[in-house]
Amino acid sequence: MGEGDEVSNKQIIFRDFVTGFPKESDMILSCSKIRLKVGEGSKSVLVKNLYLSCDPYLRGRMNRNPPGHIPSFTPGSPIIGYGVSKIIDSGHPDFKEGDLVWGLTRWEEFSLISETDMLIKIKYTDVPLSYYTGLLGMPGLTAYAGFHEVCSPKKGEYVYVSAASGAVGQLVGQFAKLMGCYVIGSAGSDEKVNLLKNKFGYDEAFNYKEEPNLNEALKRYFPEGIDVYFENVGGPMLDAVLLNMRIKGRIAVCGMISQYNLEKPYGVQNLFCLISKRIRMEGFTVIDYDHLYPQFLELTHQYIKEGKIFYVEDTVEGLEKAPAALIGLFTGSNVGKQVVVVAHE
Ligand code: NAP
C-alpha cells in the first residue's frame, strides 16, 4: 500500500459535555480513515502518536462553559491533549519526516495537525520519549516555574506539596530538596507515601485520607509552620494550610483537583489568614512560562543524567485504555505520571 492510501485511524471521541464526575462512557472509541500524506500546498504535519498524556485540566475542557482560558472540547471530535508524536509527512518547512515532537495532538493513532506552533521538536532522545509527557514536558515545566518563579523559595524553608506523588508534585518536591528546603508531601495512599519518602526524597509524607483533622495533621508535621505551599488540590486542604502558614508565606495555586467535578465548589473559610499573616497567594498557568522551557530542559536533562531526579510513570498500553486512565486521575488510581502508550516508536 502506498503512503498516500487511506488507513484506519482509531480515535477517542468526546461524546458530550459533562457535569459531575466524568465516566469512561463520556469518551467513545471509534475508527475513521486517514490518508498518510499532507495535502498539496498545506503547511500541516501528519504525525503518528506514540504517547498521550492524561492531565487533570482535560476535565475542564469537558464542561460546556469551562471556567478558565481553555475552550471546551467539541462533542463528536477527538479529545485534544499533550502527547509525543513522530512526523510521518510534513508540509511545514520547520518539520520533516522522522522528527520527534511533543505538544498538542489528538487522541487518535494518526493526526493531521495545522497548529504546528503547539509542537516542540524533541532535542534529547537519550531518555525515554514518554518523559516529554511529564518530566520534560508540560507538567515538568509547571513544577519548575511554579516552584522557582511563583513560590520565591529560600534555602531551609518549610515547603508543603499536596498531590505530591503525581506528575507535578513528585517534581516540585525534588526541585525543593535540590535547593535545600525541608519538604513534606501528602498523597492518597500508603504506597504513594512510601514513594514520597523513599524515592522522591521528601523529608516526610502522610496519607491525607487517614487524617480526620487536616489542621491537626499539618500542625503535627509543621510545628514551626509552612513557608511555601504548592497547591494542587484546593478545598478543605487549602483551609487547613491557611491556618498553618507562617508570616510572609507564599502559596502557589497550581491546581484544585478536588473541585473539578463539583457542581458547587467548596467555600474556603480561612482567607483572613492572608491578611493576618501577610501571605502571598498567587495562581499561575504554565503557558505564562513557555519562555523558560529551554533553560528548564537543559537543567532537568542534566539532573536526569546525573541521577539527581527520580521519576515515576504509570503507563497503560493501548489507546482504548485512555478514557479509564484519564478518569482515574480523579480517584487517585494513578501512581506517578499517567501516560497512555499508543504505539512504540
Ligand atoms: P497527578 O497528581 O498526576 O494526578 C492527580 C492526583 O490528584 C491523583 O492521583 C490524586 O492523588 C489527586 N486527587 C484526585 N482527586 C483528589 C481530591 N478530591 N482531593 C485530593 N487529591 C485528589 O496530576 P498532575 O498532572 O500532577 O496535576 C496536579 C495538579 O496540578 C492538578 O490540580 C492540575 O490541574 C494542576 N496543574 C496545573 C497546571 C497549571 O498550569 N497551573 C499545569 C499542570 C497541572 P492522591 O492519591 O494523592 O489523592
Image (cartoon, rainbow, N blue to C red):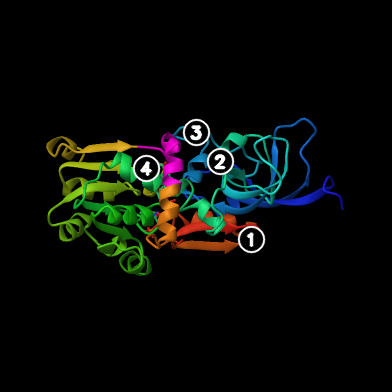
**The disc labelled 3 sits on which kind of residue?**
Asn
Number of residues whose C-alpha sits closer than 10 Å to that of mark 2, classed few (under 14), some (14–19) or many (20 or more): some
Residue 17 is marked as 2
Q: Quadrant of residue 320?
A: bottom right
Left/right placement of residue 131 relative to residue 114 reads: left
Specify which label sits upstream in the sequence, 4 or 1: 4
**Residue 266 seen in the figure:** no
Q: CA distance from mark 2 to mark 4?
A: 32 Å
Specify which label sits upstream in the sequence, 3 or 2: 2
Residue 145 is marked as 4
Q: Are marks 4 and 3 in contact (CB under 8 Å)?
A: no
Q: Which residues are magenta?
A: 284-297
Left/right placement of residue 190 relative to residue 141 reads: left
Report x, y in % for residue 106: 63, 45
Left/right placement of residue 93 relative to residue 331 reads: right
Element marked by disc 4: helix
Q: CA distance from mark 3 to mark 2?
A: 9 Å
Q: Nearer the viewer, residue 131 or 267?
A: 131
Residue drawn 54% across the image and 58% down it: 126
Q: Is residue 292 above or below residue 308?
A: above
Element marked by disc 3: loop
Say if disc 3 is inside 8 Å of ligand 1. Answer: no
Residue 318 is marked as 1
